[in-house]
Each structure stands twice: as structure tokens, then as C-alpha cells.
């Protein structure tokens, strides 16, 4: 349904299930891209899809500046420094908006956030509840 809906808005979708490698998908992420990547593990998401990428909109897990508490395996500890650096850079120029609970299914959107690039091009947004979260302003919409 997501793909059909986005096609109505003239948004072309790419799927990780298509015969493309992760690096080929990552190479398609540009400043005009909308990245929808819910619940992808941080140690895969950050170095593969967000490092050196600058999509206009990202919907997925919250991005952190320090993943130390989550680095419980050798594989994750090996990616920790890279992921922390990507997370810090990622948060510098972005505003985060938390999704409200979906009234028909309270946990359907649990943990998902939207990151929007700060600056030009973010227009027509409604003001929501705002709070300070680290160095970022967090909104609920």
C-alpha cells in the first residue's frame, strides 16, 4: 500500500528486496530523497545508508550521537566509532518530529521519527508540541 500511495504522489520507490545491493540503494540517496527505513538496526543503517548522505526527509528509528549502550556484540562494537560519528553529524542540521500514537493501533508507529533538514525548502509545516532533546528540538505531530 505504501508504494501505491507514494506513486500517486509521483514518488518513485526502491525496495531493498529488489535485486540490488545495499550499496547500490545507498548510492541513490540524494539531497532530494525521502528515506523510509523503519526499524533497521543502527549499526547497519548509519554506515550503509546515512554516512555521507544528505536526504531531505528520513523516517525511521531515532538517530543518536552515542550508541555505546547498544553495542553489546563484537560486530556492533566494531561499528561503534563510525556510527557515533555519523549520528553526531546527522543531528547537526536536522529537526526531529516524533510521530503520535496511531489511534487505531497504539504501537504501530512506536519509536518512529521524522528528520527534516533545517533551512530552505521546509515550508507549510504546522507548529506542534516542542521540547529540547540534547542539541535538537523535538516536535510531536
Image (spheres, grey):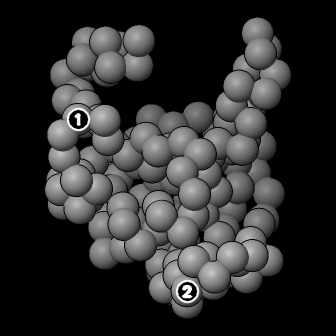
Asked which quadrant contains residue 101, the reply is: top right
Q: CA distance from mark 2 to mark 1?
A: 28 Å
Looking at this view, is 104 or 127 the one in front? 104
Can residue 31 be seen by looking at this rendering?
no
Please say if 95 is above or below 68.
Answer: above
| Identity of the residue furthest to the bottom in this view | 81
Horizontal placement of 80 versus 130: left or right? left
Horizontal placement of 47 versus 81: left or right? left
- Rendered-image quadrant of the N terminus: top left
Q: Between disc 2 and disc 1, whose residue precedes?
A: 1
Indicate the position of residue 64 as horizontal and vertical percent values. Answer: 65, 70
Question: What mark, if any, has residue 78 been given in the picture?
Answer: 2
Indicate the position of residue 20 as horizontal and vertical percent values. Answer: 19, 46
Please say if 7 is above or below 14.
Answer: above
Looking at this view, is 135 or 39 the one in front? 39
| Identity of the residue furthest to the front in this view | 74
Can residue 70 be seen by looking at this rendering?
yes
Please say if 128 is above or below 137.
Answer: above
Label 1, residues with CA under 10 Å away: few <14, some 14-19, many ≥20:
few
- Residue found at x 32% / y 20%: 3
- Residue found at x 43% / y 41%: 36
- Residue found at x 32% / y 64%: 54
Indicate the position of residue 86 as horizontal and vertical percent values. Answer: 47, 78
Could you tell me which secondary element the residue under label 2 belongs to? helix
Asked which quadrant contains residue 98, the reply is: top right
Looking at this view, is 51 or 99 the one in front? 51
Could you tell me which secondary element the residue under label 1 belongs to? loop
- Residue found at x 54% / y 51%: 40
Name the residue tied to disc 1. Answer: 18
Please say if 35 is above or below 23.
Answer: above
Total labels: the figure holds 2
Amino acid at each position: 500500500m505504501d508504494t501505491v500511495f507514494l506513486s500517486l504522489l509521483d514518488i518513485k520507490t526502491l525496495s531493498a528486496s529488489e535485486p540490488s545491493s545495499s550499496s547500490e540503494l545507498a548510492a541513490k540517496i540524494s539531497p532530494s530523497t525521502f528515506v523510509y527505513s523503519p526499524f533497521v538496526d543502527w549499526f547497519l543503517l548509519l554506515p550503509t545508508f546515512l554516512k555521507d548522505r544528505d536526504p531531505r526527509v528520513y523516517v525511521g528509528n531515532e538517530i543518536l550521537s552515542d550508541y555505546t549502550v547498544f553495542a553489546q556484540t563484537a560486530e556492533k562494537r566494531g561499528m561503534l566509532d563510525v556510527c557515533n560519528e555519523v549520528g553526531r553529524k546527522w543531528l547537526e542540521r536536522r529537526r526531529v518530529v516524533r510521530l503520535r500514537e496511531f489511534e487505531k493501533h497504539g504501537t504501530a508507529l512506536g519509536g518512529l521519527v521524522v528528520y527534516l533538514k533545517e533551512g530552505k525548502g521546509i515550508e507549510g509545516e504546522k507548529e506542534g508540541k516542542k521540547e529540547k532533546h540534547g542539541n535538537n528540538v523535538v516536535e510531536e505531530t
